[in-house]
Image (cartoon, rainbow, N blue to C red):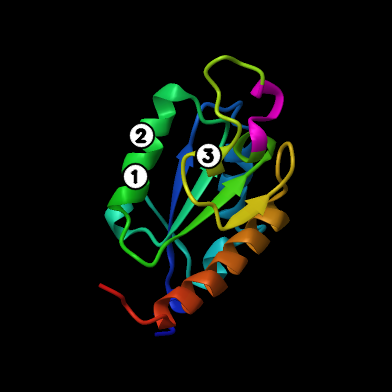
């Protein structure tokens, strides 16, 4: 089951954010960083995605959307929280409608810190998520 390492698909969800981390995620797809050299494809369909990248702070409104996207993804799947806002709410952590981090909504596998997170760190987080997917794909399915 080494297919995850050959062609993993990522779904990027930008929760309420300043777009700093979003720009860095998109920079990973440019020729300078070339995330696609790992065979990674950016998709807009959660039903095809293996890895969910989440940027920005999660508020009451985006929490339901995020949970819905996660539930539509097939197993095995991995979640990567990118940036200070996704990890802890960032500078918005005291806002009345902001959750303390993505891990309060979804099980997060990899945390990529930074404000904004650097493309090198994002790529490293995605590669770590590939290892997690490989391990989960080898686990026996329980009913």
Q: Is residue 36 above or below residue 46?
A: below
Instruction: Point out residue 69 in the picture as x, y percentages from the top left corner.
Output: 34, 44
Instruction: Look at the image and tell me whether residue 45 can be seen.
Output: no
Q: Are marks 2 and 1 in contact (CB under 8 Å)?
A: yes
Mark 3 is surrounded, within 10 Å at the Cα level, by few (under 14), some (14 to 19) or many (20 or more) other residues, namely few
Q: Are marks 3 and 1 in contact (CB under 8 Å)?
A: no
Q: Which residue is rendered at x = 31% and y = 41% of the image?
A: 68
State the predominant SS element of the stretch in magenta: helix
Of helix, strand and loop, which one carries label 2? Answer: helix
Asked whether 68 falls inside the magenta stretch, the response is no
Q: Count the marks: how many?
A: 3
Of helix, strand and loop, which one carries label 3? Answer: helix
Mark 2 lies on residue: 65
Mark 2 is surrounded, within 10 Å at the Cα level, by few (under 14), some (14 to 19) or many (20 or more) other residues, namely some
Give the camera-side residue of 67 and 32. Answer: 67
Instruction: Point out residue 115 in the picture as x, y percentages from the top left corner.
Output: 73, 36
Asked whether 90 falls inside the magenta stretch, the response is yes
């Amino acid at each position: 089951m080494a297919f995850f390492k050959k062609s993993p698909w990522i779904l990027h969800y930008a929760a309420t954010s300043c777009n700093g981390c979003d720009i860095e995620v998109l920079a990973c797809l440019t020729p300078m960083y070339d995330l696609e050299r790992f065979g990674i494809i950016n998709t807009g369909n959660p039903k095809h995605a293996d890895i969910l990248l989440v940027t920005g702070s999660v508020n009451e409104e985006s929490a339901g959307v995020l949970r819905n996207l996660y539930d539509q993804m097939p197993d095995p799947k991995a979640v990567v929280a990118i940036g200070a806002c996704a990890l802890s709410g960032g500078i918005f952590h005291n806002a009345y409608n902001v959750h303390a981090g993505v891990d309060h909504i979804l099980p997060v596998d990899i945390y990529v810190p930074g404000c904004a997170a650097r493309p090198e760190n994002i790529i490293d987080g995605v590669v770590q998520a590939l290892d997690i997917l490989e391990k989960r794909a080898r686990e026996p399915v329980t009913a």
